[in-house]
Amino acid sequence: MAKSNVGKKPISEEEYTTNKVLTVFSVCLLGVLVLMVVQRLLDYTNTWSTGMLVSRILLGIGVLGLICGVVLLAREIAGKRQAVRRILCGRNVLIASIVLVLAMAAVLYLGTGPIKVLYVVLPVLAVYYLVYHSYAKEFFLIAVDTGVGIGLMWLIHRALDTTNYVWVAYASLIAAIVLTVAQLIAVGILRGKNGKIMYRGKKKDMQFSRNAYTMLTITPVLMAVLVAAVLFAPTHILIAMGVAAAYLFITAVYYTVKLM
């Protein structure tokens, strides 16, 4: 029989994006489940050594993943391997491995404390990945600004509870101000260039909407004001976080309606 000349139909960009988002959510869910097992092992004296062994094994897997990611990335840069529309590409393997190595290193040296933080961080990363691929680029930046602002508010609240780390609270406010100024400068530059930037030698259009520059100016300023309010009026932290969350929710509704 003659061989068929009909090749495989290439995967579309929409299918590839959907597969990427599902993969990220699956990996983050698996990560949370693994962390739950590790924490349970480390919480009891009779299983503590087993928990440490599992953590070291996971750290080793992460290191091997780093090596594989570097090799794959080198092959892709050299043109020996195709990375277009491929989930298991060098960059993705490298990013996943770095997260695993950092998480397990933190657990091994700091105990179960970082695990509670990772319970929040991993789902948040998955949601941000979904927002990046599903919404307008300016809403992703707005969501990042709000997330960073809420994170700095929480950090200030924790720092003010201990006398030895009050400097962290003031450093958080300085970080919020620096990030705000940097974003305002970047927005001004983008506005002057009509949203077009040079990326890898090619001109790329950010495809911002008409109100994007106004939103990207208001958001970091609002977050910096709320961070300052938490520092100088720490008893109102719930109000400040509520304002930030309400702002993000209203903005999310607006951009969701625009997608319809």
Image (cartoon, helix red, strand yellow):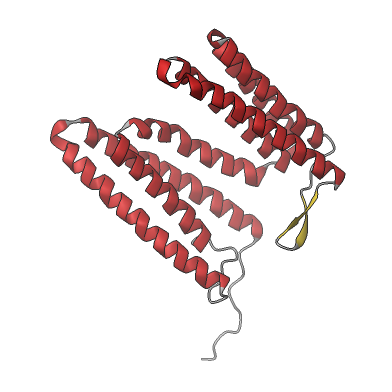
Q: Nearer the viewer, residue 30 or 237?
A: 237
For the C terminus, the image quarter is top right
For residue 155, say whether it is visible: no
Residue lying furthest bottom in this view? Answer: 1
Number of on-image labels: 0
Q: Nearer the viewer, residue 189 or 39?
A: 189
Query: Residue at image x 66%, y 39%?
Result: 140
Query: Residue at image x 60%, y 53%?
Result: 17
Residue lying furthest left in this view? Answer: 46
Question: Residue 164: where, in percent of width, then height?
Answer: 41, 19
Q: Locate residue 123 relative to residue 231 in the image: left or right.
A: left
Q: Is residue 12 depicted above or below 257 in this figure? A: below
Question: Residue 2: where, in percent of width, then height?
Answer: 54, 91
Query: Residue at image x 57%, y 44%?
Result: 129
Query: Residue at image x 52%, y 40%?
Result: 125
Q: Locate residue 215 relative to residue 31 in the image: left or right.
A: right
Q: Locate residue 87 relative to residue 224 in the image: left or right.
A: left
Q: Nearer the viewer, residue 171 or 25?
A: 171
Question: Residue 226: where, in percent of width, then height?
Answer: 64, 19
Q: Is residue 16 depicted above or below 80 in this figure? A: above
Q: Is residue 165 depicted above or below 183 in this figure? A: above
Question: Residue 136: where, in percent of width, then height?
Answer: 72, 42
For residue 122, say whether it is visible: yes
